[in-house]
Image (cartoon, helix red, strand yellow):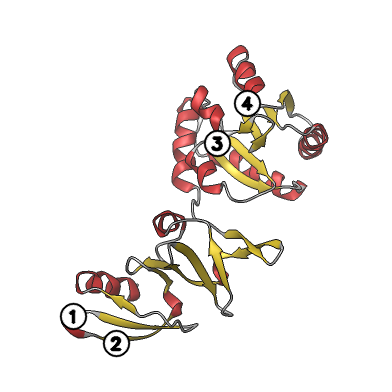
Amino acid sequence: MKVLIIEDEKLGAERLQKILLEIDKSIEIAGICPSIKTTVEWIKANPLPDLVLMDIELSDGQCFEIFNQIKLSTPVIFTTSYDEYALQAFKVNSIDYLLKPIKKAELSQALGKLSQLKNQFTGTDFNVEKLLAQLRQTSNTYRSRFLVKKGQKLITVEVSEIAYFFVEDRLSFFVTWDNQKFIADYTLEELESMLNPNDFNRINRSFILHQKSIHAIHNYFNGKLKLELKPATEKEVIVSRESAMDFKIWMGK
């Protein structure tokens, strides 16, 4: 298997190369590119590799610009120090999304995922386009965590720790099960697409709720519903008459 490494830190590229060869000595490093510019030039001048390991933050911008400049029909494992770009990554040719420092076990698992997907196609039935189509069907595009500010530090909060999101004074916030409140750097519209709809529901223009955050449901006037949340909120949480039936169906899943 030929692998192209796109990484702007020399030590990072060398470490990736070392881990790859430890996992599988038959892997061939087709090239190492430190920037968008060099990557585009390399891909135009060389046969496509079997796999690309791609750092997201490069010396001349974010790697997603590569996909705007050329067609790259090759599976990609993204590597990054942050998890803020997971959704963008899964919209392109993503096999996996690994946080630095890259762990050998995680990279080995990602390579195994590629091998498993390839094995679903046999003989002449295999081609890259079919593999990429399969990837887009099987990749989980929902967020697993958010990076937020707490005092002078940045911390990650797992989505499983979040009870609900809401809007206040044009800012988006979320509240955790232990009643901590954080700013979310996204609109509710953006958050809707990031969250698993089996768990979270945009019940009105101001709230996205986890199903388990709903403590009680009360009939309200004109066919509306009034909700009590846990943790409790001072804001009134109302489901409109038009949305009430869909809400009841979601709660019954």
Q: In terms of sequence position, does the residue under pointer 4 or pointer 2 come before the other?
A: 4
Identity, as a three-letter code, of the amino acid under mark 4: Ile
Q: Nearer the viewer, residue 138 or 231?
A: 231
Identity, as a three-letter code, of the amino acid under mark 3: Lys
Q: CA distance from mark 2 to mark 3?
A: 51 Å
Picture residue at 33% right of the left edge, 65% below the top:
205
Identity, as a three-letter code, of the amino acid under mark 2: His
Question: Which mark, residue 82?
Answer: none
What residue sits right under mark 2 in the picture? 218
Mark yes or no: residue 126 visible: no
Neighbourhood count class around disc 1 (C-alpha, 10 Å): few under 14, some 14–19, many 20 upward? few
What residue sits right under mark 3 in the picture? 118
What residue sits right under mark 1 in the picture? 223
Q: CA distance from mark 1 to mark 4?
A: 55 Å
Q: Nearer the viewer, residue 57 or 111?
A: 57
Q: Secondary structure at mark 3?
A: helix
Neighbourhood count class around disc 4 (C-alpha, 10 Å): few under 14, some 14–19, many 20 upward? many
Picture residue at 19% right of the left edge, 84% below the top:
221
- Does residue 236 appear left or right of residue 79 in this picture? left
Q: Is there a contact, CB below 8 Å, between mark 3 and mark 4?
A: no
Q: In terms of sequence position, does the residue under pointer 3 or pointer 4 come before the other?
A: 4
Could you say where residue 226 lies in the image, as x and y percent from the top left? 30, 82
What residue sits right under mark 4 in the picture? 36
Q: Is there a contact, CB below 8 Å, between mark 2 and mark 1?
A: no
Q: CA distance from mark 4 to mark 2?
A: 55 Å
Q: CA distance from mark 2 to mark 1?
A: 10 Å
Q: Quadrant of the N terminus?
A: top right
Q: In terms of sequence position, does the residue under pointer 1 or pointer 4 come before the other?
A: 4
